[in-house]
Image (spheres, rainbow, N blue to C red):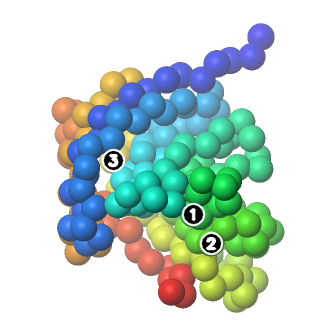
Amino acid sequence: MALKATIHKAQLQLSDMDRHVYGEHSLTVARHPSETDERMMLRILAYALHVPADDLRGRLEFSKGLSDVDEPPLWQLDLTGEVVHWIELGQPDERRLRQAHGRAERVTVISYASSTPVWWSGIQNKLQRTPRLAVWQIPADQAQALAALAERGMQWQVSIQDGTAYVSTEKGAVEITPQLLKEAEQ
């Protein structure tokens, strides 16, 4: 018998002073049985970091993710079904990133393992022709601190200023400073 996803709910209050994006979002996150708390919490963080200011070009959504290998963990689809923003977590291979780059207007990778520098040095040169790709690293200790805040029902307050995200929940708070490894061309 197949294991079922565990449903987590997050109420997200966002104040992103860097992008001037503010709002409240009710998120329902299906946690795949093979997904860790760390990855699930980073999906919520990725949502907070990349949610658009309005829905004119579609909403940022959690996809089927681990259940469908042809979809990223998060994506923004416009009203015609075209991919506006493809967001990957972890350390995808260069082939997957090139395919995503061919399908989407923007591609973002958020890597959070301590092995990120080794992974990135191995594929960096293979991604020279991906101008719409941005790659970020969340320090592993910060990602683990975020994972420790996981609960089935969560109230998130996220303030983003000067490139640093301050996340607080009833369980505690963590400061996350993503490091840019590759900037997307405008």
Which of the two marks, 3 or 1, is nearer to us in this view? 1
Disc marking residue 85: 1
Real-space Cα distance between discs 3 and 2?
32 Å
In the image, residue 156 lies at what x, y percent? 26, 40
Q: Residue at x 48, y 70 (%)?
A: 136
Nearest to the observer: residue 47 or residue 175: 47
Which residue occupies the extreme top position in the image? 1
**Above-or-below relation of 75 to 13:** below
Left of 40 or right of it: where is 124? right
**Quarter occupied by residue 117:** bottom right
Q: How many marks?
A: 3
Task: For label 3, count other residues whose C-alpha is less than 10 Å away and answer few (under 14), some (14-19) or many (20+).
Answer: some
Q: Residue at x 70, y 78 (%)?
A: 122
Q: Is residue 130 visible?
A: yes
Q: Quadrant of the N terminus?
A: top right
Task: For label 2, count other residues whose C-alpha is less than 10 Å away and answer few (under 14), some (14-19) or many (20+).
Answer: some
* Mark toward the start of the polypeptide (3 vs 1): 1
In the image, residue 13 lies at what x, y percent? 24, 45
**Above-or-below relation of 111 to 71:** below
Left of 108 or right of it: where is 20? left
Disc marking residue 99: none
Nearest to the observer: residue 85 or residue 70: 85
Kind of element beneath mark 1 = strand
Disc marking residue 105: 2
Mark 2: which amino acid?
A: Glu
Mark 3: which amino acid?
A: Ala
* Mark toward the start of the polypeptide (3 vs 2): 2
Nearest to the observer: residue 105 or residue 185: 105
Real-space Cα distance between discs 2 and 1?
6 Å
Real-space Cα distance between discs 3 and 1?
27 Å
Kind of element beneath mark 3 = helix
Residue behind mark 3: 145
